[in-house]
Amino acid sequence: MDLGPQHLRMLDAIAAGESISRGAVRLGLSQPAVSAMLSRVEQHFGARLFTRTAAGVVPTAIGAEVVARARAILFGLDDLTAALVPDPREGRTRKVLRVGAQPSPALNLLAPELGSLLPSAKVWLRVDHGQPRIVSLLESGALDVGIVQEPVGSPLTLPAGVGRHVLIPREPVFVGLSAQDPLATRAEIALGELSANEWIDDPLEEGAWPSYFRRACASAGFQPQVSFWTGDWHLARTLVRSGQAIGLYHPTSRPLDGLALVPLRDAPLAQRISVLWRAGADRAARRLIGALVHVYAELADANPAYARWWTRNADARPVPARP
């Protein structure tokens, strides 16, 4: 068997998700298909690459080496593809600006403006659920600019040569409930009042957020009950609207029929939004920050609950880039 990019991406997805099932979700494949592919790759190497545990899988010593080399190859392939995109109008290679970001409502509004960040360049966008992946890609040189969300109190350790601008010092996290829930009409909810609810968790989140969330719940006196795991926002919305579970939402999320977004009292869950960049991408980063300041203000004003929160917490507003 010849190893191809699909095998390397499979190994990367399983290692990142620490689970074959979560790896399958990342790849958009069924779990049996991923298990079969992994079995063939392990036969190719003649060794186990992952050890199965009750919680998922962990790489073996050989597996860790294979995954590290696979990621290096994938970074190189992605960089090669991005760097050699031909201009269809001129038939020559254009400079590429490689942007990475975590999904958010702001990214949806920003997308139409990406081409203006560096007008002479071809913009290449990669969306990743986990901030560690974006930081790793910046360090490797596979990305030029990144937009990341980090729990307040859990700052990122940045690689050498990567600049940083804190765009939003403190963005509170709202809880999403069914509009029929008795708590949905409240101006705010204490986190401890949600101890009996079922929560939705994101199996693709691989950063500091899961442990940060559970620490906050523990401080409020409970351990969250999770019965649903999905990175699909549409499915999560359906589960919340039906009253089967509650979830965490960006305060800039658009209010929807059947779903209420309510602030948590004293903002026990909050994140910092930062723009990161490699040397040479300073101008594009400044343009990106400027665009995000306007986009974010537009989103905040569209959500009355967040607009009210902002009036009481002016220190949490977007910070423009220095000239």
Image (cartoon, rainbow, N blue to C red):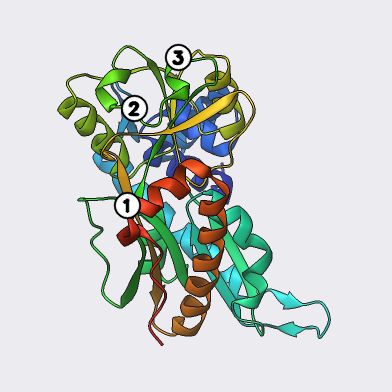
In the picture of the structure, the residue carrying the numbered disc 3 is: 182
- Would residue 292 appear left or right of 207 to someone viewing this image? right
Horizontal and vertical percent position of residue 233:
56, 34
Q: From this viewpoint, which residue is outermost toward the right?
A: 89
User: Amino acid type of disc 3?
Assistant: Pro
- Would residue 316 appear left or right of 83 to someone viewing this image? left
Q: Check whether the beta carbons of the residues at disc 2 and disc 1 lie within 8 A of each other.
A: no
Relative to 5, say whether 241 is above or below.
Answer: above
First-in-chain label (3 vs 2): 3
Say which element carries label 2: loop
First-in-chain label (3 vs 1): 1
In the picture of the structure, the residue carrying the numbered disc 1 is: 150
First-in-chain label (2 vs 1): 1
- Would residue 185 appear left or right of 113 to someone viewing this image? left
Say which element carries label 3: helix
Say which element carries label 1: strand
User: Amino acid type of disc 2?
Assistant: Ile
- Position of the N terminus, as image quadrant, is top right
Number of the front mark, 3 or 1? 3
Residue drawn 24% across and 30% down?
A: 214
